[in-house]
Amino acid sequence: MIESPPPIAPAIRPETASRGAGQAAPFLLWPVSRREFYRGIWVALLLPMVWGVILFGIRPLAMLVAASLAATASHVLLKRVFRWKRAQELVYQHSLVGAMVMVALAQPSWPGWIIASLAFLLPFAYAAMRGPGRERVHIAVAAILLVQYVLLPTLKPITFTQLPDAILARDRLVFGDIRDLPPHGEQISSTFPAGTWPISRDLRGNDAVRFNRPAVVAAGTLNEVANALPSASLPHPAELAPETLKDIREILDHAFVYDLPSVDLFYLGVAPNRIGAASLIGILIAGLFLSYRYILRPRSACLFLVVFAAASLLLAFTPNTIQHVGVRALWQVVRAFPAELLSLVQLLLFNSDAPFAAVFILALPGTEPLTPRGRRYFLALAALLAAALHRLDPATPTATLSLCLLMPVAPLFDRFLARKSWLHGRRDPGRIAPARTA
Amino acid sequence: MKLIEPVAHDIREPGSYNTPMLRLLRTRKMVGGLYFGPAAWAPDRIESTFSSDESEMALAPGEAPTDAKALAKWLSEMGLGAASAQVPAVADQVRGLGGNRPRLLVLNLLPAQPEYVLGESLTRLAMSDLSSGLELLDRTLNPERTLVAVDRHDRHTRRAWKRRGQAPREMSQRFAVAALLNQYPQAQPSILLRTLSGARLPVGALPSLLGCVVVDPVSAWAMGRRLRTGQGFVDRPVQYFGQVQGAGESRLLMAKIGETLVEFCTRHRLPSPVTTDKGPRQVIVNGMLAGESVDGATARITATTEAVAVRQKLDDELPSPCISCGWCVDVCPTGLTPVHLLELSHRVAGGKRGEAKDKRDPDFPCPSFIPQRLAVREARHCIACGLCSYVCPTRLPLTREIVQLRIRVTPGLREGATHD
């Protein structure tokens, strides 16, 4: 049933915009077009990428250059050489952003040729979908997940990627040669004279400093702490035994002294992470730039991060642990070691791809629902899912993954959560009592 | 007289502002909108080329009306209908009150379009006429509250009306200046009344439906001028924006109602609005965001012509598929989802009212599970401000299509459109 329209004032001519001699209003155009939109994102991506190159060395730089050139080449091939009709809607900046997102989400130790090959194929996929805006799932992000979970395990024997969480030693640009400083007293077998750089094959892929991701260590430490606690089903005194507290102290000390990086180096990004996700400062500046250009909604990014942080805090001890150990014992641990536990949660939080996803994945158009209300629920749900997955497997880019998983159903949030226009009042305006008579 | 600071009332503790009067004036923030900043030009005079015999005293000054009925008759005599593309005629609003006392009388000096300066200019150049017109309305309608809505950042206008309100007159007891943040389209009557009183005025409805009267500056000025000189509404100030060679700076010019644009330009020695050998020219009437493009050779100045812009015709940027950036939703002042309404407009393009014929353009895909009834209803809430089309990075014709949809789903409008 269609509602009856409100009375129309004689002076208002609603048909005005439909008639006219030619072009319809507006006659001014917002200076940001599709091209500027994607250009803003790749300009913002440059800063964390440069920082990633500085931290992780020449290999990410080669990966970045190769991927950009591959995307450019296939873009030109499709649009100018083959002149494929579907490819005419491609926007170069969009293809470039796709390639850069792939590099940003790659591990520094991954072989560059895989990423470059995928970057070459990317414009083909975009063209098949008739240009930017057609994809509801971000192809570049999906490709990276495919590489991590399908391609690399298959190609492991020929790519020397047994060390996914490593900082490359021989390629580092500014931190010098650290072949003589292996962790845990391991010796890297090098019989090469000074000044002669061996290749990975010569070293059997052993040219990197290996240490576990801080997030993995933090998650493992939290699990160890939970294991050290007595079961809630057993009778135990009101306070934890001194021996238990001593054990927990030892677990925490070992983790902080031997396994985890120092906090200053961690915040500088000198810890295993994705190339584009290592620099929190770079991501922050990029986020401010994108907000300034109206490309990123700061509220969305903040909401996602806040919910992710809160959920990480709540899930520091998993529901199974809480059920097994009991809230009381955990509360006593929290009271005894507040700073240490908070540091572990902090490492769990910042050694993830959540800041990267909150800035760059949310900046990609089409990620979120359109309406503000739909966005709030969508982001809260995505952040909860990301935090839960991250607690289970800190090595996975869970924030990106959860956003990509929920992205295809984003229109449903608009469908079920959209509010009506505020002009649609509860009361019929025609029934409003007239004012007092004069 | 009190200076109303709209947003501040909501920040203070509730008890301090929850009086009946301030409850009426409590502001509601716009859902979207865009802040364009103050206009970049300020005319120092209203240029007129009429000779003394042309601006004849068509009517004797006579006696000013004393009640609402006489006022409506007086306005009809002077030929004052709608003097703005957005604000309905004062006479219609007075009749719409049905003899009741209005709750609120608003002189709307906010720029109707971002580049407009009519309210500010008339305050500076013709304050006495403007003020006389408002006082006449205030006296005859006897509203509970009289407001002058001004741009918060337009200090000159704000101070001028503040000083005016301090004068010892009968009106000053219920007179206030509402200084609002001029986020476009704050001046649109539905948005303005929502901001000032919290009431919801359906798009296109008379403000008298809510017991309010909204007056545009030119109507108030014309009434004041008639009181002073007896002149009817035969000419009006028009803002001229020339973006072609020889046009000079933007100006405020007096135009005779009914004359052609060519005559208007010739009289003021402006470049021709007609396409010349130097390239096609485009004439835009009533603003760059919500106006319309007219044929410069045949178009005429009407009572609602507030602005004329002449520029070289630009190459249109072709629309491309939606990238779901959500900017149109963010800026929509009435909280619509324009891209869904665009899709619906395409779907109902050849069908009857309410029927969704799937005639969608493959270039404008959108999910097909949009609640159609909701969309049809919401199409009526579009005020055609043009912001969604303005910000769209893919240049989709959102405003045009939503207005078309509204015409298709609203019987009265559909008939009007076919006559047109």
Image (spheres, coloured by chain):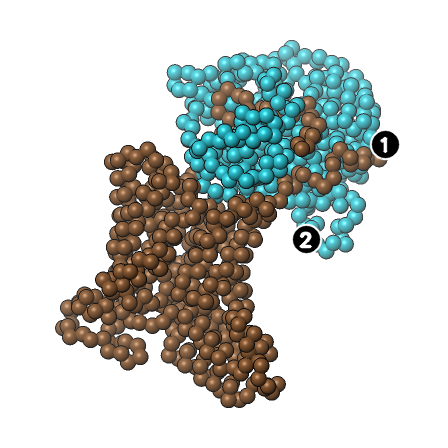
Q: Residue A136, image x and y in percent?
A: 44, 46
Q: Name which residue lies at 51% across and 26% down.
A: A24
Could you say where residue A218 lies in the image, as x and y percent from the top left?
44, 73
In the displayed structure image, the side of residue B360 where residue B217 appears, left or right = right
Q: Give the quadrant of residue A359.
A: bottom left
Q: Amino acid at mark 1?
A: Ala
- Note whether residue B361 is visible: yes
Local secondary structure at mark 2: helix
Q: Nearer the viewer, residue A114 or A19?
A: A114
User: Residue B207 in the image: x percent, y percent?
Assistant: 72, 31
**Of B181 and A408, the residue lying toward us:** A408
Which one of the lettered chains is coloured brown? Answer: A
Would you say A256 lies left or right of B368 here? left
Q: Which residue is mark 1?
A: A438
Q: Is residue A72 above or below residue B215?
A: below
Q: Gap in Å between the C-alphas at discs 2 and 1?
A: 34 Å
